Amino acid sequence: MEIHQVKQRLILTSRHEGMGLLPVKVLKSASGSILVALDPIGVKNGDWVFTIANSSARSATGDERILTDLTVGGIIDNWPPQLHN
């Protein structure tokens, strides 16, 4: 698991049916990398979240048939500012 900040929702005009209909979010890592993850819980822009990667990401969507390598697993409350500067 890693911690990321939600930057925005990614709007897709077309997607592979194996991705299901979950929202797709753009995330930024502490190192500045930009990633994309499926969001089964409904996070908002600016939220700090933890993500679940690789084969476990499918389970985290709630549907093992969904094709993903990164899924938002939860929202982190009261994330200490000194940890993400």
Image: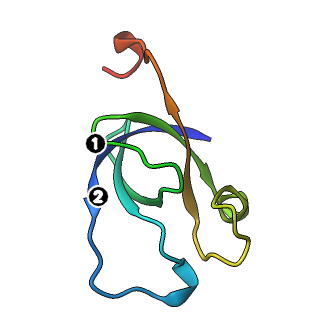
Query: Judging from the image, what secondary structure is the residue with disc 1 in?
Result: loop
* SS for dot 2: strand
- Marks 2 & 1, CB-CB < 8 Å contact: yes
The quadrant in which residue 63 appears is bottom right
**Image position, residue 51 (x, y; %):** 55, 46
| Nearest to the observer: residue 53 or residue 11 | 11
- Binning the other alpha carbons within 10 Å of mark 2 as few (below 14), some (14 to 19) or many (20 upward) gives some
Q: Nearer the viewer, residue 81 or 11?
A: 11
Residue at position x 33%, y 88% in the image: 14
Split into 4 quadrants, where in the image is the N terminus?
Answer: top right
Classify residue 27 as left or right of residue 68.
Answer: left
**Tag 1: amino acid:** Asn
Taking the image as shown, residue 3 lies to the left or right of residue 27, namely: right
Q: Is residue 50 above or below residue 54?
A: above
38 versus 44 height, above or below? below
Query: In this rendering, would 4 be left or right of 32?
Result: right
Q: CA distance from mark 2 to mark 1?
A: 8 Å
Q: Earlier in the sequence, mark 2 or mark 1?
A: 2
**Residue found at x 27% / y 84%:** 13
Q: Quadrant of the C terminus?
A: top left
Which numbered disc covers residue 45? 1
- Residue at x 48% of width, y 75% of height: 21
Residue at the spot of label 2: 9
Q: What is the three-letter code of the residue carrying label 2?
A: Arg
